[in-house]
Image: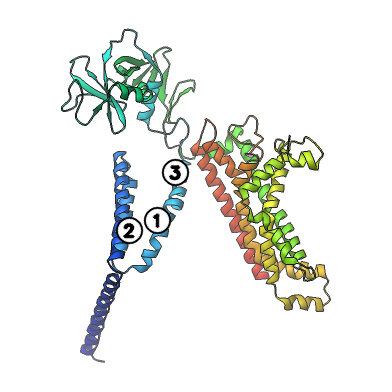
């Protein structure tokens, strides 16, 4: 083929591609137009709601100087609008909702937990340094003995309250709030200011708690003090016993002379190690992981809980599988009559909500009036839920009741799916019932249910509901540096460290969460590899 002919053929091919692209675009527009104006109206309204919510979120994020999340929100909303406004892109239209929920409720949660694990975020360390300074100065306030009386009016704007008074030096009207020192406002008068609502006596009485708790700084120098009122008409000057020096970055106790410095750990700390709280959130690197394995008051309970978590998960899977398999073999025997009715009875514990069953078992194991002690054991007083070992046994019994129906259903289906010719061949070769089961049925059954056993192990490894409802993790360890008990699993321990008690350590809890994730991932990986080995052997 000559050169001009090749060029002509190439040009024709390129023209056909362009024509085909135009035809596809025209078909996409035609398809969109055929959907009708109603579909487009619904789409525009839905996108408008999404864009409005995103805009409000961006404004709030920008106001708090969180620029990275704001940019991500803007990029995500633009992508959503492109996907649903541009004709075509049909796969993306179906995938976008799932991807959005995946990003928000899975990936973001995982990434944020990972970030928190490397900070000191928790009780007393949950805000910025500026907020901590202001909180320290506020909580150590005392009224100045010779404080002048300030005549004030209480103003309200956007749900927040402000003081209208006169400046001590110039006697001009000024307005101040909890987040802004006293300052002039355009158009201000002795009776009010544009955009603000002046409260009358009834309004002050209706909000007296909020007004009494209001502290208004005199100036940007917080050491000058705050105005506080009890009746909404007269305010007095309060100063803090702590003196903040922003240049030296120190907080000094005026009464004792002790100087507290920023040591980089999120709190003003004295030379003897005493820290002023609240502090602020800072990056601590791997300190939380080091604490988990080096601090004896944390390490001892942590390893005890870790061992019990493995024991509970393994025993739960083993006992429920053995009992479920035994019942499946029994009720799979064709010689048994009315098998379907017995099977219905066997799955009843699985049909009831698990949290209700756990509460029922908690009542059955009650020491004073539980059915087991009072009826089964004839009035005994056995501390099923308060003794460490008995509580663990009670949890395993309750979990056996909750878990065996699932294994019964799984193994019943697996047994019924086994090839009859293999079993028949074993019988012809002279294998007995036990040999047939041990050498033929059980290996084939194990290949089928091994992934489900791994999934059951992962579920019981994080079986928070049963522990929380039955024992709440108790009885508690004595002398532990964290809020944890003898029957806590790792997941319930994380919950307690993060959300229970006065000392909540989100950073340490997030570090524990990462450790749990790694453990479950490694165990699952090993388990699936062993499943692959079983499949290769069969």
Element under label 2? helix
Quarter-of-image position of residue 366: top right
Q: Is residue 162 visible?
A: yes
Q: Is residue 275 above or below residue 423?
A: above
Say which of 302 and 161 sits in front.
161
Ranked by sequence position, the earlier of labels 2 and 3 is 2
Q: Position of residue 111 (x, y in %)?
A: 44, 48
Residue furthest front as drawn: 202
Ranked by sequence position, the earlier of labels 2 and 1 is 2
Q: Position of residue 396 (x, y in %)?
A: 70, 47
* Residue appearing at x 47%, y 45% in the figure: 113
Circle 3 residue: 115
Q: Is residue 305 above or below residue 31?
A: above
- Left-right relation of 2 to 249: left
Q: Position of residue 273 (x, y in %)?
A: 49, 23
Q: Which quadrant is home to the C terminus?
A: bottom right
Quarter-of-image position of residue 193: top left
| Residue 327: image tag | none
Q: CA distance from mark 1 to mark 3?
A: 21 Å
* Residue appearing at x 76%, y 61% in the figure: 326
Circles 2, 1 touching at the beta carbon (< 8 Å)? yes
Circle 1 residue: 100
Q: CA distance from mark 2 to mark 3?
A: 27 Å
Say which of 347 and 496 sits in front.
347
């Amino acid at each position: 083929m000559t050169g001009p002919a090749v060029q002509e053929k190439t040009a024709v091919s390129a023209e056909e591609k362009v024509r085909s692209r135009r035809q596809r675009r025209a078909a996409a527009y035609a398809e969109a137009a055929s959907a009708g104006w109603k579909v487009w109206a619904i789409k525009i309204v839905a996108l408008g709601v999404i864009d409005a919510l995103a805009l409000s979120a961006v404004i709030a994020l920008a106001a708090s100087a969180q620029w990275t999340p704001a940019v991500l929100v803007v990029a995500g909303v633009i992508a959503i609008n492109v996907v649903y406004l541009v004709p075509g892109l049909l796969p993306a239209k179906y995938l976008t909702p799932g991807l959005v929920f995946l990003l928000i409720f899975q990936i973001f949660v995982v990434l944020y937990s990972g970030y928190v694990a490397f900070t000191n975020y928790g009780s007393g360390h949950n805000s910025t340094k500026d907020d901590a300074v202001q909180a320290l100065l506020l909580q150590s306030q005392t009224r100045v003995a010779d404080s002048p009386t300030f005549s004030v009016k209480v103003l309200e704007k956007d749900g927040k309250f402000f003081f209208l008074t006169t400046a001590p030096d110039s006697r001009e009207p000024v307005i101040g709030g909890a987040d802004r020192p006293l300052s002039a406002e355009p158009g201000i008068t002795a009776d009010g200011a544009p955009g603000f609502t002046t409260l009358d006596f009834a309004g002050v009485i209706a909000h007296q708690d909020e007004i009494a708790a209001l502290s208004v700084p005199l100036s940007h120098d917080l050491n000058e003090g705050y105005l506080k009122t009890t009746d909404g008409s007269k305010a007095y000057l309060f100063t803090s016993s702590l003196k903040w020096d922003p240049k030296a970055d120190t907080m000094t106790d005026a009464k004792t002379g002790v100087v507290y410095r920023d040591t980089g750990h999120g709190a003003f700390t004295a030379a003897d190690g005493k820290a002023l709280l609240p502090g602020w959130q800072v990056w601590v690197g791997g300190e939380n992981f080091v604490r988990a394995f080096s601090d004896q008051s944390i390490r001892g309970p942590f390893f005890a809980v870790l061992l019990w978590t493995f024991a509970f998960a393994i025993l739960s899977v083993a006992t429920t599988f053995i009992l479920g398999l035994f019942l499946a073999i029994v009720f799979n025997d064709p010689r048994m009559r009315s098998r379907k009715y017995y099977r219905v009875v066997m799955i009843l514990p699985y049909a009831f909500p698990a949290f209700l069953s756990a509460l029922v078992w908690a009542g059955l194991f009650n020491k004073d009036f539980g059915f087991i002690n009072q009826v089964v054991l004839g009035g005994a007083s056995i501390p099923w839920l308060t003794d460490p070992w008995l509580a663990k046994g009670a949890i395993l019994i309750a979990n056996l009741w909750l878990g065996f129906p699932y294994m019964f259903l799984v193994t019943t289906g697996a047994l019924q799916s086994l090839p009859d010719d293999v079993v028949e061949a074993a019988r012809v070769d002279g294998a007995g019932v036990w040999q047939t089961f041990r050498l033929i049925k059980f290996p084939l059954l194990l290949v089928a249910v091994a992934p489900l056993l791994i999934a059951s192990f992962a579920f019981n490894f994080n079986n928070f509901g049963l522990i929380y409802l039955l024992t709440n993790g108790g009885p508690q360890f004595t002398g532990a540096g964290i809020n944890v008990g003898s029957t806590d699993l790792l997941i319930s321990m994380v919950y307690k460290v993060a959300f229970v008690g006065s000392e909540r350590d989100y950073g340490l809890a997030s570090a524990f969460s990462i450790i749990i994730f790694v453990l479950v991932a490694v165990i699952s990986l090993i388990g699936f590899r062993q499943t692959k080995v079983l499949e290769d052997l069969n």
